[in-house]
Amino acid sequence: MGQKIVRVWVNEDSCLSHWACKVASSVFIDTGKHHPVVAEDASHRFETEKTRIIEAVMSCPTASLFLEFEDGRVVSSREYQRSKGVQEWVDD
């Protein structure tokens, strides 16, 4: 199923609280701050929630969510090509 996700994070300074990441609410959680927080045990869900995590990252309108694959590639919604869709990153 392609490259494994090894890390996800939020740029708190650029997040404008659109909460498009709610699609992966077990990874990007609401702690009452203006931005999502990555759950402490999120890494345990990287494979089972891979599609939702990628969808959340690619849905962020301010490109404030990031993920890193095991090959070192870091992506945000800036890399999203709507014509290819989320599946490009799931099957990579």
Image (cartoon, rainbow, N blue to C red):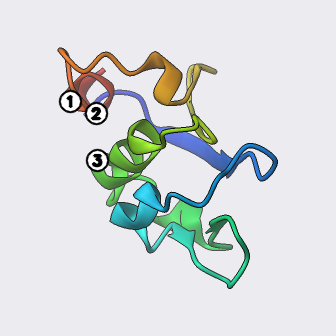
Q: Amino acid at mark 1?
A: Gln
| Residue behind mark 2 | 90
Element type at marker 2? helix
Rendered location of residue 64, percent (x, y): 63, 41
Q: Residue furthest right?
A: 13
Q: Amino acid at mark 2?
A: Val
Would you call the spot at circle 2 few (<14 residues within 10 Å), some (14-19), or many (20 or more)? some
Q: Quadrant of the N terminus?
A: top left
How far from the left and from the top, in percent, is residue 81? 31, 16
Assign the C terminus to one quadrant of the image.
top left
Which label number is shown at residue 51? 3
Q: Is residue 52 left or right of residue 71?
A: left
> Where residue 6 sits: x, y (%)?
59, 42
Q: Is residue 34 left or right of residue 61?
A: right
Locate residue 74: give its quadrant: top right
**Residue indicated by mark 1:** 87
- Residue at 61% of width from left, 47% of height from top? 8
- The location of residue 66, given as percent across then percent down, is 60, 38
Asked whether the residues under the numbered discs 1 and 2 touch, taking CB atoms below 8 Å apart as contact, a structural biologist would say yes
Q: Residue at x 24, y 27 (%)?
A: 91
